[in-house]
Image (cartoon, grey):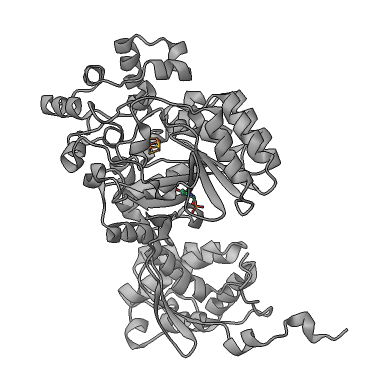
């Protein structure tokens, strides 16, 4: 329902679109002289019978579409087919009477259908290319299963181990030697990875490794998970220290008065080559002491402006269930904390971690105060039947699941790849929330950076072409999240704006609210004195 829709006139009458249509079909000197081909005559006869014979709108539209084409292409008017103007008018009115919203025949045929056809063209190239350019892990599942069998055999992983979090972590690939056994890499790449992994951490779960498509030499899973020589070439071997300017208390990061993060662990199941928290990750996995958590919680307790707390890391889901339960209990016990978030990539890197006990903990806390699970998925390739099912199960236990993607060169920096990502995650119960322009802060991954303008083109191209709630906000991280969207206001004059439709660059005139009325102190009911 469109709350702004106008009420149609209850008595059907020919509108101007339909009158124009009838005019276009009418006899003129050239057309009345032309006799139609036998085949066309037979078709019109059939279409006419169908249009008169039942109470559907489509046969009427089909008849008029055919007649219009006959007129335009062969100069044959309806009279040449033995159809008079009165019959045409009767059918046009019938169309309007059948239609629940009294849409006129002319409106549908000459306006709505061509507009829809033009809109279809905007997505046809995407629909044609998406499966080849940006296949989802659901579409490549057969290959992933073959990869899994190969990896299990090579690393002697049993099915039980494969299906358990501990088994995945125990068998995680953290050396170039193991990696080279599983993936065919050029020797120069092996050398470079060996050099980089002396400084930068690498860890891929066997599951995440199985998503790598060997045929693609720049596979987006490899690019995200396997550090390459550029990291050192860009920044040397010293990892710059953590920026201290946003940490007012132990484990706490704070940009905003009402939202803070607790970095509850430095662990992740997989280490991203574009990680903003690179400096936190360190050489060793750490879950912190109760003292550290207590100080962080005390900071939150003492600041009653804080209403939203993000438990992140690293990855919140690598915390043991008991620890996560305790943290959530503590947060739920603070009156001014109203909502919570859990930051995790586990559902795409090691979905086996999401056990029923964890889901119960999430649901129990979500029943007290809403929990949003915030994840990071950068390509459709990361959504497999397994990760999709994991998100489905999580989505039943929490308020919502949000995705924060990072715009990365070669990984998702095109329309097709980003549209496919946003649509695929939405189909997997995850809402696109942010697209981050890859940050300048860590020089290690400047080879992944994409110009702001390229991201704007991509995000803007989504408007009108994919569901509105699958369109993320485009953000620069610079001491807080700064929106990067392009303005669609072209100009304004006389209290009327000229707006640009992002999907076809057409302009729309949009009168603003009347400022005098807005300044009027009285709102509706205030006019009626008691
Ligand atoms: C991302 C982030 C937030 C949350 O920002 P939202 O716009 O509310 O999603 C808060 N604090 C820090 C330190 C962050 O990095
Ligand atoms: S999951 Fe997040 S914190 Fe962990 S390595 Fe990736 S980007 Fe960094």
Tell me where residue 393 sits by quadrant. top right
Q: Residue at x 57, y 27 (%)?
A: 323
Work out whether residue 252 or residue 425 is closer to the camera in this orientation and state it.
252
Q: Is residue 4 above or below residue 470?
A: below
Q: Is residue 524 above or below residue 246?
A: below
Q: Quadrant of the C terminus?
A: bottom right
Q: Is residue 37 above or below residue 226?
A: below
Image spot of residue 1 (x, y percent) = 63, 64
Q: Residue furthest left?
A: 188
On screen, residue 308 versus residue 417, left or right, reads right
Q: Residue at x 53, y 48 (%)?
A: 260
On screen, residue 530 versus residue 425, left or right, reads right
Work out whether residue 349 or residue 4 is closer to the camera in this orientation and state it.
349
Tell me where residue 383 sits by quadrant. top left
Q: Residue at x 35, y 71 (%)?
A: 505
Q: Is residue 127 visible?
A: no
Image spot of residue 463 (x, y percent) = 42, 61
Q: Is residue 223 above or below residue 167?
A: below
Q: Is residue 219 visible?
A: yes
Image spot of residue 397 (x, y percent) = 63, 36
Work out whether residue 305 or residue 11 is closer to the camera in this orientation and state it.
305
Q: Residue furthest right?
A: 530
Q: Residue at x 25, y 32 (%)?
A: 227
Image spot of residue 17 (x, y percent) = 49, 80
Q: How many marks?
A: 0
């Amino acid at each position: 329902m469109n709350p702004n829709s106008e009420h149609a006139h209850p008595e059907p009458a020919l509108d101007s679109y339909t009158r124009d249509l009838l005019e276009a079909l009418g006899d003129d000197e050239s057309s009345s002289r032309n006799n139609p081909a036998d085949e066309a005559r037979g078709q019109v006869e059939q279409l006419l019978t169908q249009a008169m014979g039942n109470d559907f709108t489509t046969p009427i539209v089909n008849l008029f579409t055919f007649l219009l084409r006959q007129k335009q292409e062969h100069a044959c008017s309806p009279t040449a087919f033995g159809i008079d103007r009165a019959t045409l008018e009767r059918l046009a009115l019938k169309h309007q009477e059948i239609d629940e919203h009294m849409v006129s025949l002319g409106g549908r045929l000459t306006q709505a259908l061509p507009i829809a056809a033009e809109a279809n063209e905007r997505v046809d190239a995407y629909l044609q290319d998406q499966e080849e350019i940006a296949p989802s892990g659901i579409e490549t599942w057969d290959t992933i299963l073959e990869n899994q069998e190969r990896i299990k055999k090579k690393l002697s992983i049993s099915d039980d181990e494969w299906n358990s979090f501990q088994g995945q972590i125990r068998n995680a690939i953290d050396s170039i030697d193991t990696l080279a056994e599983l993936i065919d890499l050029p020797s120069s790449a092996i050398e470079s990875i060996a050099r980089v992994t002396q400084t930068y951490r690498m860890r891929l779960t066997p599951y995440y490794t199985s998503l790598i498509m060997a045929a693609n030499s720049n596979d987006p899973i490899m690019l995200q998970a396997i550090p390459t020589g550029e990291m050192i070439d860009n920044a040397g071997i010293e990892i710059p220290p953590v920026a201290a300017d946003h940490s007012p208390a132990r484990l706490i990061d704070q940009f905003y008065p009402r939202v803070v993060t607790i970095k509850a662990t430095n662990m992740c199941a997989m280490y991203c080559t574009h990680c903003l928290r690179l400096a936190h990750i360190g050489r060793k996995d750490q879950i912190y002491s109760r003292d550290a958590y207590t100080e962080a919680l005390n900071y939150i307790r003492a600041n009653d402006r804080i209403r939203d707390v993000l438990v992140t890391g690293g990855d919140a889901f690598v915390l043991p269930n008991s620890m996560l339960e305790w943290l959530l209990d503590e947060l739920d016990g603070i009156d001014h904390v109203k909502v919570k978030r859990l930051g995790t990539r586990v559902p795409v890197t090691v979905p086996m971690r999401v056990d029923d006990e964890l889901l119960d903990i999430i649901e129990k806390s979500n029943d007290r105060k809403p929990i949003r699970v915030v994840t990071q998925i950068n390509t459709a390739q990361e959504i497999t039947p397994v990760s999709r099912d994991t998100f489905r199960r999580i989505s039943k236990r929490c308020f919502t699941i949000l995705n924060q993607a990072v715009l990365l060169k070669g990984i998702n920096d095109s329309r097709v790849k980003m549209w496919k990502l946003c649509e695929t995650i939405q189909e997997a119960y995850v809402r696109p929330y942010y697209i981050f322009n890859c940050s300048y802060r860590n020089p290690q991954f400047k080879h992944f950076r994409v110009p702001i303008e390229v991201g704007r083109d991509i995000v803007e191209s989504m408007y009108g072409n994919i569901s509105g709630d699958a369109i993320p906000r485009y953000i620069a991280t610079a001491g807080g999240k700064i929106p990067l969207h392009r303005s669609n206001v072209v100009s304004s004059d006389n209290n009327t704006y000229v707006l640009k439709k992002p999907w076809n660059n057409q302009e729309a005139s949009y009168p603003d609210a009347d400022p005098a009325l807005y300044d009027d102190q009285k709102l509706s009911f205030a006019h009626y004195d008691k």
